[in-house]
Image (cartoon, rainbow, N blue to C red):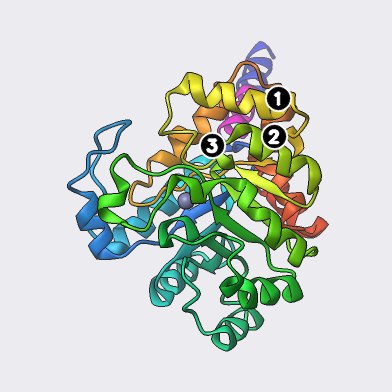
Amino acid sequence: MKHIFLWIACFLMGSFTFAQTKSKRPPIIDVHMHSVTLQQLQRDAQMPLPISGLKPPESVEQHIKQTLAVMDRYNVVLGLVSGYEYEGIEKFRQSAPARVWAGPQFGRPMLNVDTLRMRYKSGLFSVMGEVTTQYAGISPSDPGLDPYFSLAESLGVPVGIHTGISFPGITRAAPRFRVSLGNPLLFEELLNRHPNLRVWIAHAGWPYLEETIGILLVYPQVYLDIAVINWILPREEFYAYLKALIRAGFGWRIMYGSDQMSWPDVIGASIEAINQADFLSESQKRDILYNNAARFLRLTPEQTAKHQGDSKK
Ligand SMILES: [Zn+2]
C-alpha cells in the first residue's frame, strides 16, 4: 500500500514537472524587426556588436533562422518585419507567415503606390515602415510622402517612422542624415493632414523626451516603440527615459521592439532589459511586451486568445 502511495506521489510530481517545463513564457510582440541583405550582414561583420561582441550570421538564410529561433525561445508570437528589398522581406515572411507581418522600409518617396496597394490587398504587406526619412534628409511631414500615408490611412495600415537615434559617425555612411530631422515634433503636419493614420514613433523619440511627450499628449492615436534604445543606450539612461514616459502617463502606449538588424541575439537582450526593470510592475511589463501592441495593431480577440493559449500549452 505504502508503495502505491509513493508511486502515486512520484507520478504526480513527475506530471507537475512535465507541465512546468512545457508552460511557455507569456506572449511578446516585437513591433520593430528587419530583414537584411547579404551586403548588410557583410558590412556589419566589420562592426562589433556593442553588447556582446557577437558577429552577424553569415547568410540571409541563417539570419532568418536565428531570428526565428530567438523568437521561439522568448515566445515572440508576432514580429513586424521591414526591409528595403521586397524579395528579402517576402523570404522572411514566408519562413513564418503566421508570426510575421511584413512591410516596406523606405525614406525617399520612390516606391510605386499601385504596387504597394496590391501588396497590402494581397496580404504580402500588413504594416508600413520603418519609414526612414531622417536618413534620407527629409522631414516625415514632407508632402512627397502624402500618397503613401493616404494609402496607409485608407487601408488602416499602421505606420512606423524612425526618430532620434543612429550610430556615431552616421553622416559618413548616410550623408543626408540629420539629428534635427529625427525630432518627433516634425510629425505634427502629417498627423493633421492624415487624422486617421495610425502612427508610431520608432525609438521613442530618444533623446527628444519633451517633444515626444508633447506629441503623445495632443495626438492620442500615436504610440511609440523602444527599439534599439533598450539595448544600445547605457541601461540607466534607457530606464530614466522609460520612467519619464510612464511618469508622464503614457505607459499604455509604449510598445516593445528590438530592431535586431543584423544581430538576432539583441532580441533576447532587449526583452531582458524590460524583465529586469524593477521599477515596472508585472502588469506594466505585460503592457509593454504585448498588450499595448495588441491594442494598437487591433488584433482580434481570436488572435490574442490564440497567442495567450499558445503560451499555456
Ligand atoms: Zn530606426
Q: In the image, is residue 17 part of the stretch drawn in magenta? A: yes
Residue type of the residue flagged with mark 2: Arg
Magenta part of the protein: which range? 11-21
Q: Which residue is mark 3?
A: 206
Describe the element under mark 3 as helix, strand or loop. loop
Q: Are marks 2 and 3 in contact (CB under 8 Å)?
A: no
Considering only order in the chain, which callout, 3 or 2, is on the residue closer to the N terminus? 3
Number of marks in the image?
3
Residue type of the residue flagged with mark 3: Trp
Q: Is residue 2 above or below residue 225?
A: above
In the visual, does 34 lie left or right of 103?
Answer: left
How far is disc 2 from disc 1 in space, using C-alphas? Answer: 6 Å
Q: Residue at x 57, y 36 (%)?
A: 208
Q: For the residues carrying marks 1 and 3, which lies nearer the camera in this image?
A: 3
Q: Are marks 2 and 1 in contact (CB under 8 Å)?
A: yes
Tell me which corner region of the image, top left, top right, bottom left or bottom right, holds residue 247. Answer: top right
Label 1 crowding class (10 Å Cα cut-off): few <14, some 14-19, many 20+?
few
Residue 33 or 191: which is nearer the viewer? Answer: 191
Q: Which residue is mark 1?
A: 282
In the visual, does 234 lie left or right of 200?
Answer: left
